[in-house]
Image (tube, rainbow, N blue to C red):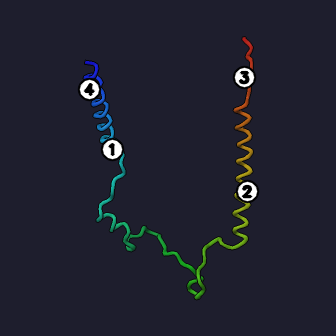
Amino acid sequence: MGKTFAWGGGILVILVLAAGGWYWSAHYAPSVPDVGTLATSTDSSAKPAGAQQPTNPSSASGASASASGSSDPAVNSDLNSIDSQMSGFNSDDASVDSGLNDQQVQQSSL
């Protein structure tokens, strides 16, 4: 009789998990757009009011377009920004460590 309850309980758990998975996938899964709505949303003629086409003045003059921010000063600026963020992280890390190593204080009764 003990084996019967074990098998029944196992099957019940499997059924509950399957029903929960089905419920979650039916209610929380991202919806896939229709092909018709996808085609109209990527149409270039359907732009919001005031939208402008981006312009590149260097391409109009015949110069080749390069990646923005790839010069040495821009890279150095990015590296300085990363260094300052890492310094901030180090101070935050020290604060967390000191907080974790804090000792319990004996409280006085009123």
Q: Which residue is mark 2?
A: 83
Instruction: Give the foreground label among 4 and 2.
Output: 4
Q: Are marks 2 and 1 in contact (CB under 8 Å)?
A: no
Choose between 75 and 49: the one closer to the eye. 75
SS for tag 3? loop
Task: Decide which of tag 1 and tag 4 comes sooner along the chain.
Answer: 4
1 and 4 marks in contact (CB < 8 Å)? no
Q: Is residue 18 above or below residue 64?
A: above
At which x and y percent is residue 77? 72, 65
Whichever of labels 2 and 1 marks the residue nearer the N terminus, that label is: 1
Distance between the alpha carbons at the discs numbered 1 and 4:
28 Å
- Which mark is in front, 2 or 1? 2
What label does residue 39 carry, if any? none
Label 4, label 3: how many angstroms apart (C-alpha)? 51 Å
Residue 27 lies, in percent from the top left, at 33, 44
**Considering only order in the chain, which callout, 3 or 1, is on the residue closer to the N terminus?**
1
Looking at the picture, which amino acid does disc 1 mark?
A: His
Pick whichever of labels 2 and 3 is earlier in the sequence. 2
Mark nearer the N terminus (4 vs 3) = 4
Of the residues shown, which amino acid type is indicated by label 2? Asp
Disc 3: CA contacts within 10 A as few (<14), some (14-19) or many (>=20):
few
Asked whether 35 or 37 is in front, the reply is 35
Mark 2 or mark 4, which is nearer the start of the sequence? 4
Residue that carries the numbered disc 3 in the rendered image: 104
- How far apart marks 4 and 2 lie (CA) works out to 60 Å
8, 21: nearer the viewer: 8
What number is the disc on residue 27? Answer: 1
